[in-house]
Image (cartoon, rainbow, N blue to C red):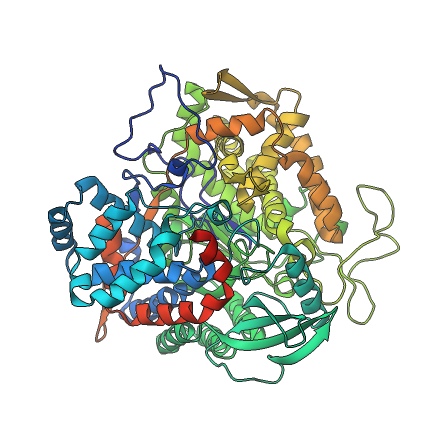
Amino acid sequence: MFRSIVNLCRCRRDCANSYLNKYKRYCSKAPMLNTNKPVKLINAMDRSHFLLPNNQRFVELDSSQAFENLTKQEKLYAHYLSQAAWNGGLIVLMQTSPESPKIFSLLHRVFLEEPLENLKQSALKAGVSEDDFQAFLVYAGGVFANSGNYKGFGDTKFIPNLSKESFESVVKASKAFENDSTHITKLLQKTQTAIYSIAPRLTSLGLAEKGVTTYFSSNCTEEDSNLVNDWMKTKLIEAYVCRTFKTVAEDGLPLYTIHLASVESSPKAGLTMEKEKYKNAYFQVTRGDYSPLLKLASENLTKAVDFAANDNEKNMLRHYVNSFNEGDLNEHKEGSRFWIRDKGPIIETYQGFIETYRDPSGQRGEFEGFVAMVNKEMSKKFGDLVDGAERFIKLLPWGQDLEKDTFLRPDFTSLDVLTFSGSGIPAGINIPNYDEIRQNEGFKNVSLGNVIPAAYKESVIPFLSDGDKQLLEKYRVAAFEVQVGLHELLGHGSGKLLRQNADGTFNFDKEKVKNPLTGKNIESWYTEGETYDSKFTTLGSAFEECRAEAVGLYLSLDQEILKIFGYEGQEAEDVTYVNWLSLLWNGAAKATEMFQPTTDTWLQAHARARFVIMRLLEVEGDGLLTVTETEPGRNLLLNLQKDRLHTDGKKIIGDFLVKLQTIKATGDFSAGEQLFQKYSRLEAPWNRWRDIVLLHKQPRNIFVQPNTVAKGEDVKLTRYPATAEGMVTSWVQRFPNSKVDDILERLAENDSKYFSEVEKIAE
């Protein structure tokens, strides 16, 4: 759950595409924005809002230099880890929408049968325009990058920038259609309506009535989610590796099946459970979800063991394999413990059901796998930050009683990403997310160094003065590296959860520790079986990201910390200012893109977190931060008073951090919800200014990643052009046959009975 995403202008996730991408939001056939003429504001349900434009920016995620410096053994280790990540990453298609696996299969089969140039010529002969063919490629690139037809950052649906008829013409002009028209026609018929439908419920991810999700069957409401959550608490089951399907038992009562992700599907004591009754409903636990895809991941992790550098890595991988095979979350936790102990590896990896952003109830993990190589220069800076961490944590305003008894020194490295599977690429990660490990045993911080500069390529920045734009362009990468370090290490890595142990004892002095907000004794805490996720559910991700972002702002004011990153004097002041400016700009200029007015729902945790911080400073800052409408209905201007950051800014953020940490430490969900409601409601003028934000909306970067190919003991790295064609080619070569398509179609067909309501809505 805890990550920092390149969007300071994704940590799940998100993708880590910059908030500063410099691309026009309109498709190639649309007129460019003319600031001298009246502009029609974009309605939330305007079809254009869901299009991937033809000028979508693709950028290369280059890791070639770091990869070529590896030994043969290290390259083979990285290769098999990457194969595991890519195959496991296909699970995200199953976790996104009912149609995503079938869309992937259709597109992949079309591209698999012939070179893109041949397909293009056939499509043009069939009457498809060049623009429409480009739109087809861009849409495919979006599906591949987001692991489905909903954006990894924001969870909103995207649709092709060409008509249904043109889409069908491209498919039917393909060699794949010529070779097997029956199968391709069937796939087209099963997906085409769902691809294009923007019925209100289908425009974003969420539970019944508010959106679509495959973490729950389509008939599950928030009430169902809460009931399932209650039952799982009674069984001490954490939800990371499961989905929930609601059917009707023979006596007419609801039957909730908790389906665990695993290769094995047979019952097993301690993991699966027979049907039992609870609160006038039945519950059971089965396993075998995503079985064939997890099998491919496990097979490659097993191959990687032979090339691991040490016993920690070997044990880590074996436990991951056991977890995937059996559906046992405890095995993944054991693997995570070995991962923590593997200090400073040359090749870093973490794979499994990790981040909970996209589960509407905030508890089920999306599959994620990354493989990366150490960046020694930046890792040295992060190492120095770790060395001073115990000293810097004492600067945080909530006091020792709400801080961990002992700082668990983590590994903090900067890595160049070779492979990142999932719905998007973050810039920084703080994992594992398991409370008992993070609190008592430790964690790792990872900054994905080559993501940051790639994400900031080609940017346009609305709503700022020329002077602020120049500063942001000059220092944004530097500031973001500082923010990632502080956000991950001292944000997510700090703070204590007050807990009552199973034996009735407490991990704090119940008689002496006072609540900083009331001055009274602590009145609430976590009990056995309760975790932060289970207590804060849908609020949890946004609340924690807000806390970590605020820590980053607060500590970036410290000159000693800036010196670690190489900045002193005026330059340090500029980096600090840009750090604050970029986060607040993001809260004002980007965040509301992720708000759904029709359901009054925030679709993305980081966006809501940054909007809350922005509104906090706007409301409480007495002019410290102002946002004004400079052109009615067209433009805004954000102004931040640089000379007040060390005084008023520090006090406001410091007081807010005390509230956030106290609420988190005591598990006071209702207080957290009340606090966030205060600052994240879209009241006037922000409900109107959202239209202005959408008017300036820019497509997010799509990363083109390389492939590794093993021939004997040699591993070669294949790079691709930063284009839609390069993106498509990378995925064809990543999966050079239709085996995975067969698997995805079979899994989707098996699940279809749970999502019939969604299919009817699309129709």
> Does 154 sit above or below residue 429?
above
User: Splitting the image into 4 quarters, where does residue 337 fall?
Assistant: bottom right
> Does 21 sit above or below residue 313?
above
Residue drawn where x is 22% and y is 59% of the image: 111
Q: For this rendering, which residue is in front, 191 or 18?
A: 191
User: Splitting the image into 4 quarters, where does residue 48 fall?
Assistant: top left
Image position, residue 46 (x, y; %): 42, 35
Residue drawn where x is 56% and y is 70% of the image: 333
Count of numbered labels shown in the rendering: 0
> Does 660 sit above or below residue 298?
above
> Does 144 sit above or below residue 585?
below
Q: Is residue 587 left or right of residue 478?
A: right
Q: For this rendering, which residue is in front, 301 or 588?
A: 588
Q: Is residue 317 left or right of residue 171?
A: right
Q: Is residue 340 left or right of residue 223?
A: left
Residue 721 shows in this picture:
no
Residue 522 shows in this picture:
yes
Image position, residue 485 (x, y; %): 51, 46
User: Splitting the image into 4 quarters, where does residue 710 fall?
Assistant: bottom left
Q: For this rendering, which residue is in front, 427 or 52?
A: 52
